Amino acid sequence: MLMLALRSLWNRRGTAALTLLTIAISVLLLTGVDKLRQDARQGFFNTVSGTDLIVGARSGSLPLLLYSVFNIGQPTNNIRWSSYQQIAEHDQVAWSIPITLGDSHRGFRVVGTTEDYFKHYRFGQQQPLQFSQGQAFDDLFDVVIGAEVARALKYELGDRVVIAHGLGPGSFANHDDKPFQVSGILQPTGTPVDRNLLISLSAWEAIHLDWRAGTRIPGLNVSKDEAREMDLTPKQITAFLLGLESRISTFHLQRAINNFRAEPLQAILPGVALQELWQVMSIAERTLLIISACVVFAGFTGMLGMLLTSLNERRRELAVLRAVGASPLRIVALLLFEAMLLTFLGILLGMLLLTLLTLGIQDWLALEYGIFLSNPGWPTGTQWWLLGAVQCAGLITGLIPAWRAYRYTLADGLTPRL
Amino acid sequence: MTDTTAIEVQQLRFGWKPDQPVLQIEHLHIPKGQQVFLRGASGSGKSTLLNLLGGLMSPQQGQIQLLDQLLNTRSQRFRDRFRADHIGVLFQQFNLLPYLNLIDNVTLPCRFSSLRRQRAGNPEAAAESLLQALGLQSFVEHPVKTAELSIGQQQRVAAARALIGQPEILLADEPTSALDSDSRDQFLTLLSQQCQQHQTTLVFVSHDLSLSHHFDRVIDLSEINHKGAV
C-alpha cells in the first residue's frame, strides 16, 4: 500500500514537486521568522549583563542604549571627562568603563575605552570577554578587534589598521598618519562587541590632536612619535557603564546622576531599557509571524487544490483499487498518507532551505544589520511546536480530499462516473 | 447443491430511491464454472447488478449468496475482503494503473489478498505465465510502459490481473466495448479459455448479443428483472 502511494505520487511528480516547494517555502518563512525572532531576542538580552547603569548625555533612554551598546545611531552629545571622573570615584561605584564613539574602520565602529573594558564588561550569563589571540593594549597605537571584524576583514595579529574619521563606510577622511596595529583578537560573543575595534582613550586623543570639528587642522601635523610625548588625557567621552558595589544603591545613584549639576546627564538601567526596546520590536515581530502564518495557509490551499484536482483524474485509479479489494478506509488512508507525506517532505525541505539560507546570509546579516543568527541546528522548542502545527495543518488539509475520495468510492463502486 | 453454487440471488430489490426500484430479481442461480453472458441495454441496471454482486453495494431487500457466503448480511469490511479473495473484476476501459509496470499491475490483487497470493505461489511467475497465455509474451521479454500498450493489449493485461490467484468468480463489465471486432473475438476466446482452465465462473455483461456464442449460457436482464411489475 505504501509502495502504491509512493508510485502514484511519483507518477504526478511535476505537480507534487510544486506543492512540495510551496509548503517548503512557507515552512522556511515560518521557521525563519521564528528563528530571527529568537536570535534577535537572545542577542538582544545577552548584549549587556552585569552592568547596573549606563550613563550618557541627556537624551532618551532608547537612543542612549542603542548607541552605547548596540552600535546603532549617533551619540547626541559628549560628557566631560571631569564629570566621568567625579562619578567613577563615587563610594558605591565598583567599576566603570568609559566609552568614546565616532570613528570607524571599513564600516565597523571604533570604540575608545580603557583596560577596564576587558576586565569588567560582561555579556550573556555574566561571561567576561576573552582573547582568542594576543592581548589588550600594550603600545599606544594598539587595537583590539572583535571576532567578526577579524573574520570579515581577515585580520591577524600585527596587521596595520587605519581608522577613518566619522561613522559609516563612506568616510574619506582617514587617520592614515597614525596607523594602528592589531594586538589582540577577542573570542566571539554573539553580541555587537564582535563588530567593534577597541582602542585606548589616549590613542583616541592622539589621533585627534590635529583635528577639529571633523577636519584636519591645516598646517598642523603631529607625528606618531610627537603624539607620544604630549598630554593625552581625554577631554570628553561619549558614555560610560557602571558596576555598583551593591544593587540596592542603583536607584539612588541613578537619581544622583540624573540631577548632576555640572552638565545634563542621564543614567539608565540596561534591563529596563532593553525591555522597552523589545516592546517596540515585538510588534514587528508579531506582524511577521502572522504574515508567515498566512503564507503557510496559502501553501496548504495550494496543496488542497492539487489534491482535489488530481482526485478527479484519479477516480479510475481509485475504482481499480476498490475492485481489487481495497476498502474505502484504505482509500482514505492512501490520500491522507499522501497529504501527510507531502507535508512532511515539505517540512524537511523547508528546514534544509532554512539551514542553507542561515549559513548563506549569516555573515551578511551580521555585517549589515548587526543581527546575529545562531548556527543552524536541530529545531528548538517553539520550532518543534510550529512544525507540529504545520504537520497537523497538512493532516487537516488531507482530510478534505480523503473525505471526497471516500464519497466517490462509495458512490462509484466499480463504475467511475467520468 | 450449495458447494456447486457460484452465485445465488433471491428476492433482490434495489433502487437509488426507495419507491423507484432499478433491479428486482426473484431468482438467479449460476453454478460454479459456468460462463454466463448477461445481456442488457444501457441503463437497464447491468452495472448496478455487478456492483451488488461485487459487494460494493447492498440491496434493500433480498439475498445475495456468493460461493457459500451470504454477502448481503455481512459488513462492508467483510465484503471488501471477500472481493479481494474471490472475485476478479474487468472494466470497460482504463483498467491499469499507469504508474505500475505490467507485472505489478497483474500482481496487484496479491497485495490485497493473502489467499490469492498463496494460490498464485510466486506472483511474478504467475503473472508472467498468465501474460504469456494471453498472448503478451513479447512484453514479458521486453517490458514497456503501461501507457504504451494498445487498448486491446491493456484489456488482456487487465484480464490477467482479474485471473491471478484463481478467484472463483470473474465479473466483467463490457470489457470489449472499446475493441474492434477482430480483437474482440480474439480477446473473448482467450478469456473463456483461461476461465475454463481455472474453473472460473464468468459473468460477462454486455449489450452486444453478437458475442454470445462464446458463452455457455445467455441471460437477458430484462427477462429476470421485474422492476415496476410488482
Image (tube, coloured by chain):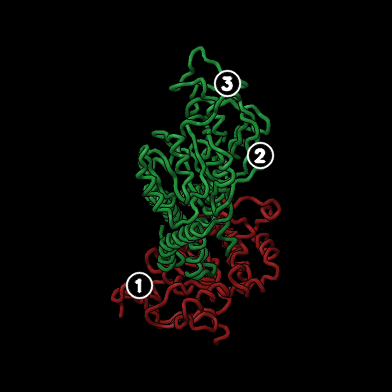
Chain colours: A green, B red
* Mark 3: amino acid: Asp
Q: Name the residue under label 2.
A: A135
Q: Residue furthest top?
A: A219
In the foreground, A193 or A286: A193
Q: Position of residue A117 (x, y in %)?
A: 56, 42
Q: Position of residue A384 (x, y in %)?
A: 51, 59
Q: Position of residue A385 (x, y in %)?
A: 48, 60
In the foreground, A223 or B110: A223
Instruction: Please tell me whether mark 2 or mark 1 is closer to you in this view.
Output: 2
| Residue A353 in view in this figure | no
Element at label 2: loop
Residues indicated by labels 3 and 2 sit on the same polypeptide chain: yes
Q: Name the residue under label 1.
A: B22
Marks 3 and 2: CB-CB under 8 Å?
no
> Which label belongs to residue A50?
none
Q: Mark 3 points at which residue?
A: A176
Q: Which chain carries label 1?
A: B
Q: State which quarter of the image contains the C terminus of chain B.
A: bottom left
Taking the spot 41% from the left edge, 70% from the top edge, the residue there is B48
Marks 2 and 1: CB-CB under 8 Å?
no
Relative height, residue A362 to residue B125 (above, below): above
Q: Is residue B108 left or right of residue B121?
A: left
Q: Which chain carries label 3?
A: A
* Mark 2: amino acid: Gln
Q: Where is residue B16 in the image (x, y as percent from the top left)?
A: 34, 71
